[in-house]
Every structure is written in structure tokens, then in C-alpha cells.
Amino acid sequence: MSDFFNNYLNIKKIWRDKREYREQMARVEALPEDYQYVFKKIQAHTWMFAGGSGLDMMDVHYGLIDLFESGAASGKPVLEVTGSDVAAFCDELLRNATTYTQNWRDKLNRDIAKKVGGGR
């Protein structure tokens, strides 16, 4: 129960997280317009899959900002950074994040193992 209070009801932590988010979004606003557009589209897409508290997704987004800043500084077009299949790029970003789809997969396997037996 203390984890719940530390992660979800800790006002100081919430303020710190909000401040950090605003700082990161200011970095996005400093990117070229194409990078901003693609970042916001990726951000909206990946949030659909956020699981748990969503903090894993914030790490994904902050890493994406770093990548985009580097690409923009090198003068690369944004699709040279992501590739033309941006949806596949998003799948790769989500590979190590806690997502609802992973939660659903885990639940499916757990339920079946419980009913049918996972030891076989």
C-alpha cells in the first residue's frame, strides 16, 4: 500500500514530474516543425498503449526527444531518423515499456496456465 501512496499520492513527486514534463515539452517546442509534428503524433499513438502509472512511457518519450534533438542538430529529415514506417518505429519504442497489451498477454497466459496447468 505504501507503494501506492509513494507513486500516486505523493504531491511533491507529482509536482516534480509535472515540472519535468513541462521542461521536456519545451525541448520539443524548440525542435523544427516537422520533428514537433512527428513527435506529437508518436506521443499520442504510444499513450494508447501506456500501462501502469505511465512512467515507462515518459522515459520512452524523453529518449525520443534526445534522439530527435540529435537528428535535428545533424540536419537530418525526421523520417530519416524514424524511417518511413513510423508505426514500426513506435513498436520498437514500446518494446521495453510496460504496456496494456503486455498486461493483456500476461493475463491471458496466467489464466490459461491456472485453468489448464502451466507445468506441461
Image (tube, grey):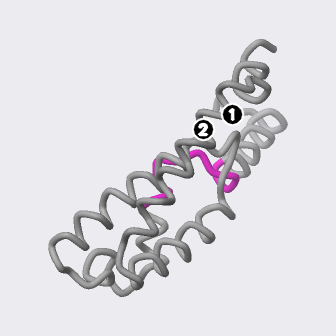
Q: Secondary structure at mark 2?
A: helix
Q: Is residue 42 magenta?
A: no
Instruction: Identify which residue, 106 or 19, lies in the foreground.
Output: 19
Question: Local crowd at mark 2 within 10 Å, few (<14), some, or many (≥20)?
Answer: some
Please tell me in which quadrant of the rendered image residue 119 appears: top right
List the residue tagged with mark 1: 14
Instruction: Identify which residue, 113 or 34, lies in the foreground.
Output: 34
List the residue tagged with mark 2: 17
Residue range in magenta is 93-102
Please state which amino acid type lies under the numbered disc 1.
Ile
Q: Is residue 80 above or below residue 105?
A: below
Pinpoint residue 107: horizontal percent, then vertical percent. Answer: 75, 43
Residue at x-position 32% and y-position 81%: 78
Q: Is residue 21 above or below residue 117?
A: below
Residue at x-position 63% and y-position 43%: 18
Instruction: Identify which residue, 71 or 16, lies in the foreground.
Output: 16
Direction right: furthest residue:
115
Residue at x-position 69% and y-position 64%: 48
Direction top: furthest residue:
2
Pinpoint residue 11: horizontal percent, then vertical percent. Answer: 74, 26
Proximity of marks 1 and 2: CB atoms separated by less than 8 Å: yes
Question: Which image quarter is the N terminus in?
Answer: top right
Q: Secondary structure at mark 1?
A: helix
Residue at x-position 25% and y-position 73%: 72
The answer to whether residue 120 is left or right of residue 67 is right
Please tell me in which quadrant of the rendered image residue 68 appears: bottom left
Direction left: furthest residue:
74
The answer to whether residue 10 is left or right of residue 60 is right
Pinpoint residue 27: horizontal percent, then vertical percent. Answer: 41, 60
